[in-house]
Amino acid sequence: MGLNAISKWFLRATPSLLFLLFVFGYLAEVLVSRALIPGRHAVLLEAVSVLDGAFVLVWMSSAGSFLNSIIPPPSKFNLSIFRAALVIMALYPLFASDRFINYPSSVYPISVPFHVLAWLCGFYVINLLSKSLVLAEARNVSSFFDYAFEFLLIWVFPVIGVWFIQPRINRLYSKSSNSLAVSNGPTYGAIDASR
């Protein structure tokens, strides 16, 4: 499967642990924004905000890579495009920050298309995750309505969706890990036919 330790952690994490991680990230952002003098230390606030958003993006990357590895080959998606969409989503806060918005009007022709592109990438990533989750659970997908509920849950993942989506990811990961361990395990009682 080739997942790194961070991806494995996110795939095995309980919904309550992820919820607390997202809530603490949000609370840190709120506390930093209230403690800072307006106009000063804006970089610190942006750093905390980016860190908060990074948790969701890393979860999306982990879930997407894992789900793509277990769905049937005709349904697999291009991981390079998926990761590029995640990078664009990660860069979006930089273009949405006050510092960038207050730049001269010569920057607006760049920022508006980037905002639109980032939102389209968000829809793309959420669409792939929700569709792949339904496919991984061995259900047939013929239209968007087959995975629309999962789409909405991933859209509101940090608050509500985590309680419904993460247990399903946990089950799939556990099942995949168990089947991998069984297939790589020793073969007791195998007959050596070469004799």
Image (cartoon, rainbow, N blue to C red):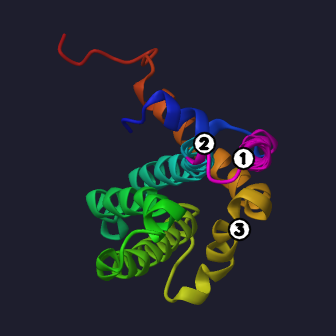
Question: Alpha-carbon neighbours of circle 1 within 10 Å: few (<14), some, or many (≥20)?
Answer: few
Name the foreground residue: 136 vs 23.
23
Q: Earlier in the sequence, mark 2 or mark 3?
A: 2
Tell me the number on the disc at residue 41. 2
Quadrant position of residue 21: top right
Q: Position of residue 190 (x, y in %)?
A: 38, 18
The answer to whether 118 is drawn above or below residue 116 in the figure is above
Q: Which percent across, then down, holds residue 32?
A: 73, 43
Where disc 2 sits, the SS reads loop
Residue 74, x across and y down, in percent: 31, 69
Q: CA distance from mark 1 to mark 3?
A: 31 Å
Residue range highlighted in magenta: 16-42
Residue tagged 3:
156
Q: Say which residue appears at 66% left-offset and 45% top-offset.
A: 170
Instruction: Say which amino acid is labelled 3.
Output: Val
Q: Is residue 108 magenta?
A: no
Q: Are marks 1 and 3 in contact (CB under 8 Å)?
A: no
Q: Which residue is mark 1?
A: 37
Residue kind at label 2, given as amino acid type: His
Mark 2 neighbour density, 10 Å: few (under 14) some (14–19) many (20 or more):
few
Identify the residue at image location x=68%, y=38%.
Answer: 13
Q: CA distance from mark 2 to mark 3?
A: 30 Å
Taking depth in this image into account, of 152 and 40 the one nearest to the observer is 40
